[in-house]
Image (spheres, rainbow, N blue to C red):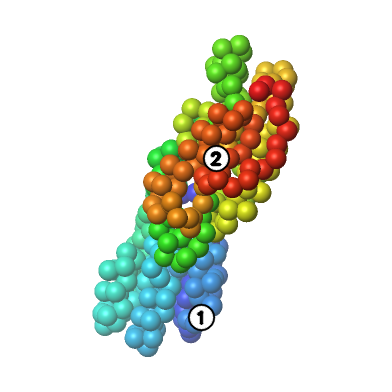
Amino acid sequence: MSSTPYTLLVVDEAESAMVRLVKALGTEGYSLRHAAPGPEVRRKASEVDLVLWSVGPHAELTRDWLDNLLGPDGSKRPALVVLAHRDARAVWLDALAQGAEVVFDPWDAEELRARVARSLRSRARMEQLAREVGELQRLSSTDGLTGVHNHRYFQERLREEFRRAQRYDDPLALILLDLDHFKQVNDRHGHTAGDGVLREVAAALQRSVRETDLVARYGGEEFAVLLPRTQLTGALTVAERVRRDLGTLRVGPDGVLNVTASLGVSSFPHRSVLSPEQLLLTADEALYRAKADGRDRICLHSQLPLLPTVSSPND
């Protein structure tokens, strides 16, 4: 059992079971609270570890409250032990079907303590499992070096966001970014320094965009920024902010390396963008043009005027 006292909520309209429960469970160090069946039970239940529900004479009403308490999300609900008379069959069968423990009244104190303890252990195991699953999901979608999303997750979200944009007639923009002359960093300073640069660039990207935007490592020294519900003009503003912020970085072991990047921007809706693959392809073509035109600049997927930039000393 936990070294921290568990909090139990006793739901009992007449408080007829409260005295007996205090006597049976008091030696276990539990903290007991009381509530009458009603709308507040679900809120109070979210603040405790286990609910002890003493089934009263109004079985059908109690069954409704149980359904409301348990709800659809089993991962967030408290453990539940139902104290029921055998003749309230519909209630305790429903409770059993939803994973609750049932103790028949009149109940044995030793049995009650054992079932409460088992319910709390089971809930603790479920919470630990949920944490482990959540961590595995996070790891499966995260680039191990930079901490931003990985290529596989980016591809999934690109398809999802494109379908959503089509369905709701929303704009969607994509920025592909490639660090300029990154091979020279690895060649001159080593791959450890290069890895540090990538981590700092990833952190800078996350600071430069909204929480609703998605930053991913697309591959090598290339990153992608997916901008849901963002028009082309808004994407250009973000791209220029990213380019400017990266230009102020001083990275590397001694903080003496400067970083520049070339960026390609594509957006939907556009006559040449009819699929997520085309959104990616047009952004990639714009990125290639930015590299070919001298680096440290932004290019668009269409022949619109480019944002003015200051030539980089590395060009």
Residue at 43% x, 73% y: name it.
Answer: 69
Mark 1: few/some/many CA within 10 Å (<14, 14-19, 20+): few
SS of the residue under disc 1: loop
- Image location of residue 88, percent across then percent down: 29, 82
Give the total number of marks visible in the rendering. Answer: 2
* Dot label at residue 39: 1
Q: Nearer the viewer, mark 1 or mark 2?
A: 2
> Label 2, on which residue?
264
Q: Nearer the viewer, residue 18 or 294?
A: 294
Q: Nearer the viewer, residue 208 or 92?
A: 208
Up the image or down, 211 lies above or below 261; here it is below
Up the image or down, 6 lies above or below 296; here it is below
- Image location of residue 288, percent across then percent down: 51, 33
* Dot label at residue 22: none
List the single residue furthest toward the top: 188
Q: Amino acid at mark 1?
A: Pro
The quadrant holding residue 106 is: bottom left
Mark 2: few/some/many CA within 10 Å (<14, 14-19, 20+): many
SS of the residue under disc 2: strand
Up the image or down, 10 lies above or below 118; here it is below
> Real-space Cα distance between discs 1 and 2?
54 Å
Residue at 47% x, 76% y: name it.
Answer: 11
- Image location of residue 160, percent across then percent down: 41, 54
Mark found first going from the N terminus, 1 or 2: 1
- Left or right position of 201 against 106: right
User: Is residue 3 among the parts visible in the rendering?
Assistant: no
Residue at 57% x, 56% y: name it.
Answer: 230
- Image location of residue 67, percent across then percent down: 38, 75
Q: Nearer the viewer, residue 281 or 58?
A: 281
Q: Amino acid at mark 2?
A: Gly
Q: Quadrant of the C terminus?
A: top right
List the single residue furthest toward the bottom: 58
